[in-house]
Image (cartoon, rainbow, N blue to C red):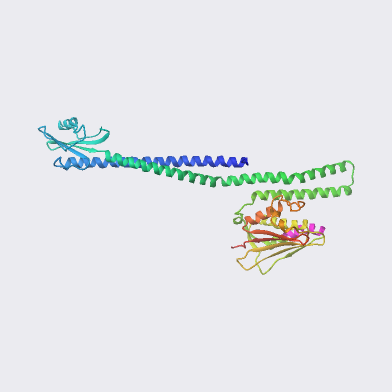
């Protein structure tokens, strides 16, 4: 069983923390909303019953037929008390009747008897004193149903909130995961790729120091100096590749300007011309003047792509060989196409995808692929394009880039 790495553990803790915080916040909000709804309903029920009792006390002429759930009691000035049949136990409230009859103000009170709450309103009407009792049982039953409905809604809402909070946490931590992955990959690439050239440079510098101490002539140490300079150049290119790997990501197409790949390729071939002449390899540029070659993107990154492909071709093309960069496109909206073709050593067709993997080896386990081609494909993919390779051993190779034309 694979144990999660430090990045996975960090991301998991970040997701759980964010999800927990979001869930807690939304739960509190749901509870507050439920409490407010319950308070409003309870307040409305009591207000409605109170209004009904006051109206009944003011308008009802007898005690025979009160509103449902209500009872009326009438105390005359002579002390004669009449009331609705079958009143709840403990009613009428004779003490309240006597206080109001004696000249006290109207009274509104809540009384509990027999496990049920009642709202009692007592007032004078003419020479009589009227008391209306209303049961709160129906309102309590309705509030109970409301509490059950709110509880179910809160539970379902909590489940939905947990799911939404986790999804939002995953989306919120996705950039963090990408940044951590790029950081880890950069460190791994740097440590893997830079170890050998740095060791070689250190060894060459030591040999050069020994030659200088031995009094070697400039002509004798010239080759060592050339090797040292070549090594530093290669190391610089490798560092550029590593830095480019941290900057390249999908969506880079939207950043940049219009880039003419024909002009860009011409500059790359001019830069690599001295190396090609030293290797006795011919570099040829074949643009198509009738087809557009302008794309939208980051010029330094696209320059690095073409440089990597031509550099790769130079590394595998012997003296007397040819490298051709062909540019053009089909009719819009077809993409701009760049072919880098050589007649060098080629590669096994089974390695057509493997060569774009970082630090991969060929099927024969002798040919090793570094970062250049992998990063070149990342740049092309980040610009919304594709890159593929074709080749056969001893018959050369063709690398094809397709990029959306500018304006698409």
Residue at point 74%, 56% (across, down): 312
209, 359: nearer the viewer: 359
| Helix, strand or loop for the magenta stretch, by majority | helix
Q: Is residue 53 magenta?
A: no
Q: Is residue 292 above or below residue 34?
A: below
> x, y (%) of residue 148?
36, 41
Magenta-colored span: 267-279
From the viewer's perspective, is 121 left or right of 242?
A: left
Compare residues 382 and 351 and report the one nearer the observer. Answer: 351
Determine the residue positioned at 35% across, 40% down.
147
Q: Position of residue 331 (x, y in %)?
A: 62, 68
Q: Position of residue 95 (x, y in %)?
A: 18, 30
Number of marks in the rendered image: 0
Residue 227 point in image, percent of width and height: 82, 49
Q: Is residue 144 left or right of residue 67?
A: right
Q: Nearer the viewer, residue 110 or 244?
A: 110
């Amino acid at each position: 069983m694979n144990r999660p790495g430090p990045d996975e553990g960090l991301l998991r803790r970040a997701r759980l923390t964010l999800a927990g915080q979001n869930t807690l916040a939304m739960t509190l909000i749901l509870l507050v909303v439920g409490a407010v709804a319950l308070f409003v309903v309870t307040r409305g029920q009591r207000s409605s019953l109170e209004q009904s009792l006051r109206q009944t006390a003011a308008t009802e002429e007898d005690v025979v037929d009160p509103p449902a759930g209500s009872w009326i009691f009438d105390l005359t000035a002579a002390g004669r008390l009449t009331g609705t049949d079958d009143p709840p136990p403990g009613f009428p409230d004779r003490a309240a009747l006597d206080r109001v009859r004696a000249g006290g103000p109207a009274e509104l009170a809540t009384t509990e008897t027999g496990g049920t709450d009642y709202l009692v309103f007592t007032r004078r009407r003419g020479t009589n004193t009227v008391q209306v009792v209303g049961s709160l049982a129906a309102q309590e039953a309705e509030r109970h149903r409301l509490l059950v409905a709110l509880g179910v809604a809160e539970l379902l809402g909590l489940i939905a909130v947990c799911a939404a909070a986790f999804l939002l946490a995953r989306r919120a931590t996705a950039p963090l995961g990408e940044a951590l992955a790029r950081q880890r990959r950069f460190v791994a690439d740097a440590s893997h790729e830079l170890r050998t050239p740095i060791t070689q440079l250190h060894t060459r510098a030591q040999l050069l120091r020994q030659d200088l101490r031995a009094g070697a002539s400039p002509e004798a140490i010239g080759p060592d100096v050339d090797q040292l300079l070549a090594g530093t150049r290669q190391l610089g290119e490798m560092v550029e590749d590593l830095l480019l790997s941290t900057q390249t990501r999908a969506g880079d197409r939207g950043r940049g300007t219009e880039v003419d790949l024909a002009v860009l390729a011409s500059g790359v071939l001019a830069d690599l011309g001295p190396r090609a002449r030293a290797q006795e390899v011919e570099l040829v540029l074949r643009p198509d003047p009738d087809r557009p070659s302008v794309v939208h993107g980051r010029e330094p990154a696209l320059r690095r792509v073409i440089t990597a492909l031509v550099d790769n071709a130079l590394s595998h093309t012997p003296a007397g060989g040819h490298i051709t960069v062909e540019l053009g496109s089909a009719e819009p909206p077809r993409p701009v196409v760049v072919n880098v073709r050589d007649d060098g050593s080629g590669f096994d067709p089974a390695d057509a995808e493997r060569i774009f993997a970082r630090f991969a080896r060929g099927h024969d386990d002798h040919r090793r692929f570094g970062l250049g081609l992998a990063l070149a494909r990342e740049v092309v993919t980040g610009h919304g394009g594709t890159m593929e390779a074709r080749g056969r051993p001893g018959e050369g190779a063709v690398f094809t880039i397709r990029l959306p034309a500018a304006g698409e």
